[in-house]
């Protein structure tokens, strides 16, 4: 990891550090778009073709057998099942509080307005499975969908030897999800978005993925025949702000935990103590070579850096501009500095709040905005699986009292028919 001193950085260099490693989406779109168009036209036949080409899948029956789902528990240890259940409990408990409150209000006598929330009827959850098995992501997406009351929840995940991992099947069973498909990549996104004679399309797709999955999600979201998506997503990110109260071993462990996500992940340390920076670098070098995913970590660290600031306020200003997916605040005066954080997907406070806790089992959601989108997006919530609907009911006298306002504004905008729709009633 390269080390920079904030006050020695030029404006252009600071701006460069704030930018994410560029993904050539234009080139990726050229690869992904023909796949999506083929799936849109030929449905399941095309999707299976690409699944065979990219994942080596040979099974033409993509739907997971219900017996396999029900029997998945037999292939998992008691420790794994207990961990999944405990994570389920905490995530459910936190997300249950997110159910939005409906309200009704009389804006003026005889004019009553209300707002209520309804579940999105059909949703698709994309669960990556390339370099790691991710039952945690299924929990993070499936639980809020369950709480929201979505009638149909389907799962797509890339197979390994034509099978999904028992942990995915066990988690799906825990969630009550029975419609799982053994398919990943852009072809899975296309199948969920456009549907097929045998597989009904969904209204919204959720879940992370590689750059091809991300590109496919972006494309189907702007196709009139496609569907909505949860949020723009990119490579994983972690930023740590540390002062002299931070434990360098903890900080290094946090940086490495996020660096192992993928070759294009990015981790950053901002500190006002050069000694902390030096100790963290030494720890990272020592521990990185011992990790199972050391090659991925090595590539990720090439995208990563340390900035030594004059003070913590300066570090927070940089962080707010960067708007990280995950932000760990390892400082002595947490209450003071927490108030200054304005842009982050999820915030981790203190030396004993590792990012791993949020990834798995503290209760918050790990499906979060990346690539600076934390300035405008939050993470996945129960509300992400719902839509709001407003209603209004006017009495005759209520409409009469409001008519002058409506007619005046409608005529100002040269919309006579709007005005007449009121005049005819009064």
Image: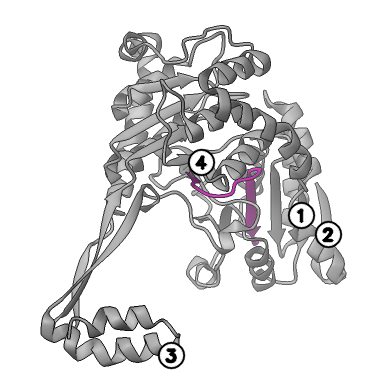
Q: Where is mark 4, residue-wise?
A: 225
| Image point (55%, 72%), residue name | 340
* Cβ–Cβ under 8 Å for marks 3 and 4: no
> Residue 242 in magenta?
yes
First-in-chain label (2 vs 1):
2
Instruction: Identify the image quadrant of the C terminus.
Output: bottom left
Q: Nearer the viewer, mark 2 or mark 3?
A: 3
**Relative side of 81 to 319, left or right:** left
Q: Where is mark 2, residue-wise?
A: 4
First-in-chain label (2 vs 3):
2
Which mark is on residue 137? none
First-in-chain label (1 vs 4):
4
**Closer-to-camera residue (134/222):** 222
**Relative side of 184 to 4, left or right:** left
Q: Where is mark 3, residue-wise?
A: 412
Instruction: Specify few, some or many for label 1: CA neighbours under 10 Å numbering under 14, 14-19, or 20 or more.
Output: many
Where 249 sits versus 405, above or below? above
Applied colour scheme: one colour
* Residue span colored magenta: 228-243
Coordinates of residue 273 in the picture (x, y in percent): 73, 62
Where 274 sits versus 214, above or below? below
First-in-chain label (4 vs 2):
2
| Image point (51%, 38%), residue name | 207
First-in-chain label (3 vs 4):
4
Which mark is on residue 306? 1
* Cβ–Cβ under 8 Å for marks 2 and 1: yes
Label 1 sits on a secondary structure element that is: strand
Q: Separation of disc 1 and disc 3 at Cα? A: 58 Å
């Amino acid at each position: 990891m390269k080390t920079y001193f904030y006050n020695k950085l030029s404006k252009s260099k600071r701006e460069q550090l704030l930018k994410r490693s560029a993904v050539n989406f234009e080139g990726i779109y050229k690869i992904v778009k023909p796949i999506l168009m083929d799936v849109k036209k030929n449905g399941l036949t095309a999707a299976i073709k690409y699944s065979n080409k990219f994942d080596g899948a040979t099974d033409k029956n993509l739907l997971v057998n219900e017996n396999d789902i029900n029997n998945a528990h037999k292939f998992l240890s008691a420790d794994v099942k207990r961990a999944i259940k405990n994570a389920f409990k905490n995530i459910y408990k936190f997300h249950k509080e997110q159910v939005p409150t409906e309200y009704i209000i009389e804006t003026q006598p005889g004019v009553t307005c209300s707002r209520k929330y309804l579940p999105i009827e059909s949703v698709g959850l994309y669960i990556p499975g390339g370099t790691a098995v991710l039952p945690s992501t299924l929990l993070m997406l499936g639980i809020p969908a369950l709480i929201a009351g979505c009638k149909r929840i389907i799962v797509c995940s890339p197979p390994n030897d034509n099978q999904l991992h028992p942990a995915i099947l066990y988690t799906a069973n825990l969630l009550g999800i029975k419609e799982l498909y053994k398919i990943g990549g852009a072809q899975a996104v296309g199948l969920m978005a456009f549907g097929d004679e045998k597989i009904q399309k969904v209204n919204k797709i959720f879940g992370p993925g590689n750059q091809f999955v991300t590109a496919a999600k972006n494309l189907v979201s702007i196709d009139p025949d496609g569907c909505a998506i949860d949020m723009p997503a990119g490579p994983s990110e972690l930023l740590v702000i540390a002062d002299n109260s931070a434990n360098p071993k903890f900080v290094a462990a946090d940086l490495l935990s996020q660096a192992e996500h993928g070759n294009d992940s990015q981790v950053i340390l901002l500190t006002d103590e050069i000694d902390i920076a030096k100790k963290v670098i030494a720890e990272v070098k020592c521990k990185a070579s011992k990790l199972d995913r050391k090659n991925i970590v090595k590539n990720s660290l090439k995208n990563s850096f340390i900035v030594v600031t004059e003070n913590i306020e300066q570090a927070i200003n940089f962080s707010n501009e960067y708007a990280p997916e995950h932000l760990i605040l390892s400082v002595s005066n947490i209450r003071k500095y927490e108030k200054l954080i304005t842009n982050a997907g999820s915030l981790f406070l203190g030396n004993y709040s590792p990012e791993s806790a949020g990834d798995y089992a503290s209760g918050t959601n790990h499906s979060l905005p990346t690539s600076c989108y934390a300035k405008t997006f939050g993470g996945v919530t129960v509300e992400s699986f719902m839509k709001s609907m407003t209603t209004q009911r006017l009495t005759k006298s209520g409409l009469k009292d409001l008519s002058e306002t409506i007619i005046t504004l409608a005529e100002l905008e040269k919309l006579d028919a709007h005005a007449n729709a009121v005049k005819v009633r009064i």
